[in-house]
Image (cartoon, grey):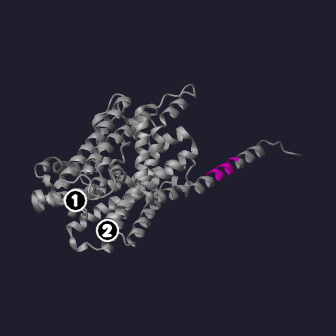
Amino acid sequence: MATSPNGKSLGLAACTAIVVGNMVGSGFYLSPAAVAPYGNLAIIVWIIMGAGAICLGLTFARLASLVPAVGGPYAYTRLAYGDFAGFLIAWGYWISIWTSLPVIAIAFAGVMVDLFPGLGNRFTATCLTLGVIWAIVLVNLRGVHAAGLFAQVTTYAKLIPFGAVAIIGLLYIDTSHFTEFNPSGQPLLGSIAALAPLTMFAYLGLESATVPAGDVQDAERTIPRSTVLGISIAAALYVLGTIVVMGLVPRQELVHSVAPFSEAAGIMWGRGGELAISIAVILSSIGALNGWTLLMGQVPMAAARDGLFPPLFARLSPRGVPAVGMIVSAALATVLVLVQALGSEGFAAVYRLMVGLSTMTAVVPYAFCSLARTLVAARLSSGRGYPRVTAIELIAFVFAMFTLYGSGAEPVLYGLVLLMLGIPVYVWQRRNAAAAVESEEMTAGAATRPAVS
């Protein structure tokens, strides 16, 4: 990879690859089955959500241009709104990460069940889901020195075959599958709201190009361009992929599918095509799990270093990784998998709840950041002026709020409870910090006090 004279190595192509690679994940593989009950309306919602995602991505790009050395929803929220808001967003962003792990692992287990039908019982599927989560955690605990190369390999592994299905598959579709606009039986607005979290989950990661902003060449131009280009590529893949799968697999079968793209490839190219897609999903799921596992240790570590999370999250293992954050996060993801495994809901219900919970806890940080630019700019200028809120930022905020509404009562309730459970942690941290300052002041005062003879 070429390096610019100022030492920054990430150009437009690299940043675009980061955005596309982080967005195209399990939300894409399983989404055709999840949105199948809504017929042609699902395709329209994919396009609408793509436009909203571009607006939201641009707000992050503008924040990165203001503070190019700092990235992520937590950092921007803390700078704009203060420590408490920063803590809540770090807490919620962390929750969104470990609640997304089961969804990615479910994609992996679904493909394994499709390849080996004998594994198709709840106990085995649960073991596969938990097994791949903890296997990736163990790999990361040992230290992953080639993470960048591994991510590139898995990104290409998924884009090439899925791109082939999304483009070449247009020649195979059966147009009779698109006769129903909204067969769900729900009102139009209710159907759109129900589709919002299912599609938004696939767009999570749209802020990825802002994270390495300090290493981006010409960040003020490259980050907005790569964000729009990356989201546009992902959106095109989502729309075309959904059209192809819905046009090949009958809706009654698609609703219950655990590997919709593999089934579509099998219809077009036989067992060989189905196997190629299945292998791509397996490799890509492992790569996505690896990336989110790295991140779920980094987010609490960053907050702990700022004094907002317990100090143990900031400790590094002898191999230089935030092991506590990874293990605690994986344990919470395990509890989520087991709770759902013990219930009576089917695959689709489990998928919807986990997607709703992960999306809800992710769009709360997005909502905060959508209007943060004017406050960040004012703080950087020492309060000498507040820039106007732009139309793009207002659209991004409305987009995030509508997605939150569409997440549904159950995920929002669970997500709100999980967010509120963070308040005692914040109070504890503030109390400990105040006690530490008081202790230091007393020690300093004793050291400067003259001795009495």
Residue sitting at x 43%, y 35% = 393
Name the residue beneath numbered marker 2: 128
The stretch drawn in magenta includes residue 218: no
Judging from the image, what secondary structure is the residue with disc 1 in?
Answer: helix
Where is residue 160? Give x, y as percent: 19, 48
Residue situated furthest right in the rendering:
453
Horizontal placement of 179 versus 93: left or right? left
The stretch drawn in magenta includes residue 434: yes
Q: Using a 10 Å C-alpha cutoff, classify the residue at mark 1 as few (fewer than 14 neighbours), some (14 to 19) or many (20 or more).
A: many
Figure quadrant of residue 445: top right
> What secondary structure prevails in the magenta region?
helix
Mark toward the viewer: 1 or 2: 1
Q: Amino acid at mark 2?
A: Leu
Residue situated furthest top in the rendering:
384
Q: Which residues are magenta?
A: 429-437
Q: Quadrant of the N terminus?
A: top left
Horizontal placement of 435 versus 39: left or right? right
Name the residue beneath numbered marker 1: 260
Residue sitting at x 38%, y 53% = 292
Judging from the image, what secondary structure is the residue with disc 2 in?
Answer: helix
Where is residue 132? Give x, y as percent: 33, 64
Q: Nearer the viewer, residue 350 or 123?
A: 350
Q: Is residue 148 visible?
A: no
Number of numbered discs present?
A: 2
Residue 81: numbered disc: none
Q: Is residue 168 above or below residue 380?
A: below
Figure quadrant of residue 99: bottom left
Distance, label 1 to label 2, CA atoms, is 19 Å
Q: Amino acid at mark 1?
A: Pro
Where is residue 41? Give x, y as percent: 27, 50
Q: Which badge, 1 or 2, is on the more N-terminal residue?
A: 2
Q: Is residue 300 above or below residue 221?
A: below
